[in-house]
Image (tube, rainbow, N blue to C red):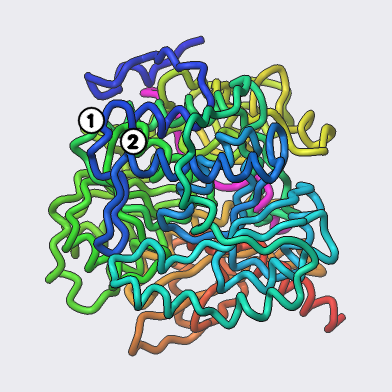
């Protein structure tokens, strides 16, 4: 097929890559062989080398094998970003198990669904979440809970660490658990003499990761070892990653974006990873200033929060060569405001968990088009198909983005019908609406499921979102289609104002009238102190829409 994007690749980015057919754990083990004494992780000043991380993951894997956990068993990770996550992730894979990354902030009822759906019998978590995990041993297949203490990976005296380990959450969990409660520290204390990782077929399931449920019930996405490894190589090539770079990991590793961009690709490249267990704008600014990362990956709301940090100009962001932005649209206003205040360069990209994660982006060194999600990565074919799926569309025409890539998922777990709807003739239908320009740069206009139909007219919420962020009083906002008795749907916007300013709904509606066709003008404006967000900071349009449907249902 015609691939106009290849002409605009950075000079040293290959057009195709020979991906090694190896298990995911080969990422860590390979770098430990190449860079044994290089710092792999930095956590509040505590450093671990590649050799140390590799040996600790071997020990954890060996302990899992003694518990008769092996080929095909599911090991869930209910953890924030810290070295214990990396050890548990690669250790579980080395045992032959399938890793199930989960959001530790999920409620007990949400986790009940995930454990029942995945059939995970083992979970690794921290004391803060151990009571939730213990309760699930009574109503899911979960048999054992392994506790990892963040304190064990901090650069503090042993007496202080020991005090932190005397944890009330763990004491209570011991009384309620119906199964084993184990300590990760004990499991990684003994040398794994003679240990050999499980032999796995690269085409087999390695990661069972769940969609965020932002468009409905969460689905288990089956990723093969090969797909994850291939995607890490793509990211390494596109981002010019090597052992001289330093990655700031603030996106959670349990999300596909954080997992493969800030963990796997970074480790594959021999980078040092500076880890933050949770997002705080000021903490992130301080960390950039102190540890001088060269790259990081974020979502647009993180840029908004960083821009709003008081006196953000005093923090030195000059070490950052690239700030990769994905998971949600990067508006021109957000990009311009962030770059003006910090001097950092925000580069928009695109990915989806059904293809592991990042799959296209603007070039790091070459032509960067604001508003575009960039060019397909090496070995990624992309095209635009009509919304009914019957024909391919030429450049400039709007339709659904379809992908063919070595990183495509094996399918949705136990959902063959959903898989068949999403993968057709080897092409992954993304559900994202957009177009390709004549130079092969792609653009997203909206999600197929987010399209608002007002009296028969199609309205793309992103167009209104762009306008919201251009308003000088707005901190953040989003556009939602809500039920309407006469038009089918009408448009409502939710807005968070900047601190210290006031505004009226009428003021904003007049603003929209100046810039939009009449049928696109929102009918309602609601001001809020905050908006619902996913674990990585993506504003949840679906949650707001569901709130409105529920509210309007009660009123009719």
Quarter of the figure with residue 206: top right
Q: Position of residue 273 (x, y in %)?
A: 31, 48
Q: Residue at x 34, y 65 (%)?
A: 154
Q: Residue at x 59, y 45 (%)?
A: 63
Task: Provide the residue span drawn in magenta.
Answer: 436-455
- The circle on residue 366 is 1
Residue 438 part of the magenta segment? yes
Q: Position of residue 352 (x, y in %)?
A: 55, 40
Q: Position of residue 188 (x, y in %)?
A: 48, 50
Relative to residue 50, is residue 476 drawn left or right? right
Relative to residue 295, is residue 17 drawn left or right? right
Residue 122 part of the magenta segment? no
- The circle on residue 362 is 2
Q: 452 or 342, which lies in front?
A: 342
Residue reaching furthest top? Answer: 1
Q: Are marks 2 and 1 in contact (CB under 8 Å)?
A: yes
Q: CA distance from mark 2 to mark 1?
A: 8 Å
Above or below, 554 against 432 in this view is below
The crowd level at tag 1 (other Cα within 10 Å; few <14, some 14-19, many 20+) is: few
- Quarter of the figure with the C terminus: bottom right
Q: Secondary structure at mark 1?
A: loop
Q: Residue at x 21, y 33 (%)?
A: 365
Q: Secondary structure at mark 2?
A: loop
In the rendered image, is residue 278 in sight? no
Q: Position of residue 510 (x, y in %)?
A: 47, 75
């Amino acid at each position: 097929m015609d691939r106009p994007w290849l002409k605009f690749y950075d000079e040293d980015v290959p057009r195709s890559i020979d991906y090694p057919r190896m298990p995911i754990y080969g990422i860590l083990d390979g770098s430990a062989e190449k860079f044994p004494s290089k710092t792999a992780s930095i956590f509040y000043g505590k450093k671990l080398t590649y050799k140390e991380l590799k040996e600790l993951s071997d020990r954890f894997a060996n302990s899992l094998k003694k518990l008769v956990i092996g080929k095909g068993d599911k090991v869930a990770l209910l953890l924030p970003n810290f070295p214990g996550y990396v050890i548990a992730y690669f250790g579980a894979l080395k045992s032959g198990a399938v890793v199930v990354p989960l959001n530790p902030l999920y409620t007990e009822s949400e986790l009940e669904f995930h454990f029942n759906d995945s059939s995970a019998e083992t979970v690794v978590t921290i004391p803060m979440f151990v009571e939730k995990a213990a309760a699930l041993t009574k109503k899911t297949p979960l048999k054992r809970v392994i506790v990892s203490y963040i304190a064990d990976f901090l650069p503090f005296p042993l007496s202080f660490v020991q005090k932190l380990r005397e944890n009330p959450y763990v004491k209570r969990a011991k009384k309620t658990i119906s199964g084993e409660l184990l300590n990760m520290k004990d499991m990684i204390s003994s040398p794994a003499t003679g240990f050999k990782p499980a032999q796995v077929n690269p085409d087999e399931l390695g990661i069972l990761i769940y969609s965020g449920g932002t468009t409905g019930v969460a689905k288990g996405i089956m990723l093969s070892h090969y797909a994850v490894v291939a995607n890490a190589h793509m990211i390494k090539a596109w981002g010019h990653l090597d052992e001289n770079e330093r990655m700031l990991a603030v996106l959670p590793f349990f999300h596909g974006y954080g997992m493969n961009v800030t963990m796997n690709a970074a480790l594959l490249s021999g980078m040092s990873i500076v880890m933050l267990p949770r997002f705080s704008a000021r903490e992130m600014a301080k960390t950039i200033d102190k540890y001088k990362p060269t790259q990081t990956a974020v979502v647009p709301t993180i840029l908004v929060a960083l821009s709003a940090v008081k006196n953000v100009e005093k923090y030195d962001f000059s070490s950052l060569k690239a700030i990769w932005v994905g998971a949600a649209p990067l508006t021109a206003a957000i990009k311009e405001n962030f770059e003006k205040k910090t001097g950092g360069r925000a580069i928009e990209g695109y990915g989806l968990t059904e293809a592991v994660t990042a799959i296209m982006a603007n070039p790091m060194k070459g032509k960067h088009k604001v508003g575009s999600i960039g060019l397909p990565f090496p070995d990624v074919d992309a095209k635009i198909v009509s919304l009914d799926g019957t024909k391919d569309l030429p450049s400039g025409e709007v339709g659904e983005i379809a992908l063919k890539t070595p990183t495509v998922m094996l399918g949705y777990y136990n959902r063959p019908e959903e898989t068949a709807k999403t993968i057709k003739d080897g092409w992954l239908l993304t559900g994202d609406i957009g177009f390709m320009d004549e130079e092969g740069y792609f653009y997203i206009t909206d999600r197929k499921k987010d399209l608002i139909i007002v009296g028969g007219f199609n309205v793309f919420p992103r167009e209104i979102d762009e306008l919201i962020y251009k308003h000088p009083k707005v901190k953040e906002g989003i556009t939602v289609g809500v039920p309407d008795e006469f038009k089918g749907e009408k448009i409502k916007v939710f807005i968070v104002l900047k601190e210290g300013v006031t505004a009226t709904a009428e003021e904003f509606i007049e603003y929209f009238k100046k810039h939009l066709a009449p049928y696109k003008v929102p009918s309602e404006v609601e001001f809020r102190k905050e908006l619902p967000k996913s674990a990585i900071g993506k504003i949840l349009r679906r949650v707001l829409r569901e709130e409105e449907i529920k509210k309007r249902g009660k009123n009719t």
